[in-house]
């Protein structure tokens, strides 16, 4: 992983579809704030690692964001379920709200996350 001013670059090969997500620091948003990227149905999606309910990290073990069925991202604290492709909460205490999504592109075997662009 390399972290630039407003960009994180990861190897595409390190991101398995429906598997573990990759975390990265987001110092612009706070000292201990992290982001993460997951691959879902072939495409990478990146988010700020903060639940829309209470601002805690989602992963129940480091990098574990998916439900057992690999169909939703789940918050370890109270079980909110988010759509992996847009971060929309479909179930749980913050239903109807969304994760903060980060711009991400994949090209030439690399995943490039624009950490300065919450979309
Ligand atoms: S903190 Fe995530 S569901 Fe409550």
Image: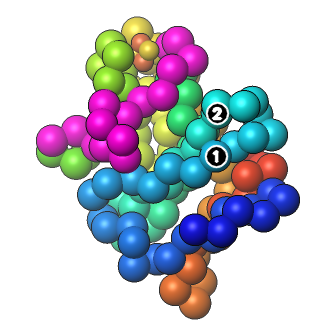
Horizontally, residue 115 falls left or right of residue 88, namely: right
Work out which quarter of the rendered image holds the N terminus and state it: bottom right
Q: Is residue 16 above or below residue 69?
A: below
- Residue 117 relative to residue 33: left or right: right
Q: Is residue 68 above or below residue 92?
A: below
Ligand 1 quadrant?
top left
Q: Is residue 111 magenta?
A: no
Q: Which residue is mark 1?
A: 25
Q: Which mark is residue 82?
A: none
Question: Could you give the CA–CA distance between mark 1 and mark 2, rounded to whole angstroms?
Answer: 6 Å
Q: Which residues are magenta?
A: 53-68
Pointer 1: residues within 10 angstroms few (<14), some, or many (20+)?
Answer: some
Locate residue 48, reporting x and y percent: 60, 38
**Residue 33, numbered label:** 2
Horizontal side, residue 24 vs residue 43: left or right = right
Q: Count of labels shown?
A: 2
């Amino acid at each position: 992983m390399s972290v630039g001013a407003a960009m994180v670059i990861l190897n595409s090969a390190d991101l398995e579809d429906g598997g573990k997500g990759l975390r990265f620091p987001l110092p612009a948003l706070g000292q201990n704030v992290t982001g993460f990227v997951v691959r879902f149905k072939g495409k990478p999606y990146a988010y700020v690692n903060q639940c829309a309910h209470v601002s805690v990290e989602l992963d129940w073990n480091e990098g574990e964001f998916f439900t057992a069925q690999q169909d939703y991202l789940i918050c370890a604290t109270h079980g909110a379920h988010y759509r992996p492709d847009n971060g929309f909460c479909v179930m749980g205490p913050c239903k109807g709200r969304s994760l903060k999504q980060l711009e991400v592109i994949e090209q030439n075997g690399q995943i490039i996350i624009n950490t300065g662009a919450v979309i």
